[in-house]
Image (cartoon, rainbow, N blue to C red):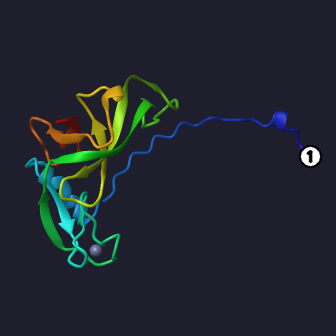
Amino acid sequence: MGELKNVVEVKVPIAASFSWSVGKYMDRYIKELKNKKLFGVKCPNCGCVYLPPRMICGRCFTKIEEWVEVSDEGTVESFTVAQVKLDRGEGGLKELEEPEIIGLIKHDGTDSCLVHRLGEVKPEDVKIGMKVQAVWTDEPNGELGDLKYYKPI
Ligand SMILES: [Zn+2]
């Protein structure tokens, strides 16, 4: 039996860069962001509208193929205030200089929620049920970052 205090420990930082396919539905969703448009899908069976889009209805398991343009306005259904960087990165959790507000946003006319940042509002002023609107970058490129955050309206 060896003694644990004699075990040599080596720390090896690993940098792993990778890419993956977002799939057919998210591909279209992201491409439409370039036009500052939000496209979701509507279930042909139960009528549920999903944003972001999904291929199979979560309520009735029907395949969804109808695309619908969705309003850029919605309601905060829930939120959290992050005090640490969400991406741990090297060196573990790091405290943020300014807290970040992450909201669960239900767009008008949809039956699902999208997770995104809230901006132009202080954490103490965010309320569940608050109306918000998408804020876009000035020159969208067809990537997730085109939708910067949601602001109160
Ligand atoms: Zn359905």
**Image location (x, y in percent) of residue 91:** 52, 29
Circle 1 — which element? loop
Name which residue type carries label 1.
Met
Residue 130 found in image quarter: top left
The location of residue 81, given as percent across then percent down, is 40, 33
Check the image and name the residue furthest to the right.
1
Which residue in the structure is indicated by mark 1? 1
Left or right of residue 116, residue 71 in this image = left
Q: Residue at x 28, y 36 (%)?
A: 118
Residue 68 locus on image (x, y percent): 13, 64
Q: What residue is at 36 percent from the left and 27 percent from the top? A: 124
Few, some or many residues within 10 Å of mark 1 (<14, 14–19, 20+): few
Say above or below: 64 vs 72.
Answer: below
Report x, y in % for residue 40.
19, 61
Whether residue 84 is visible, yes or no, is no
Q: Nearer the viewer, residue 49 or 13?
A: 49
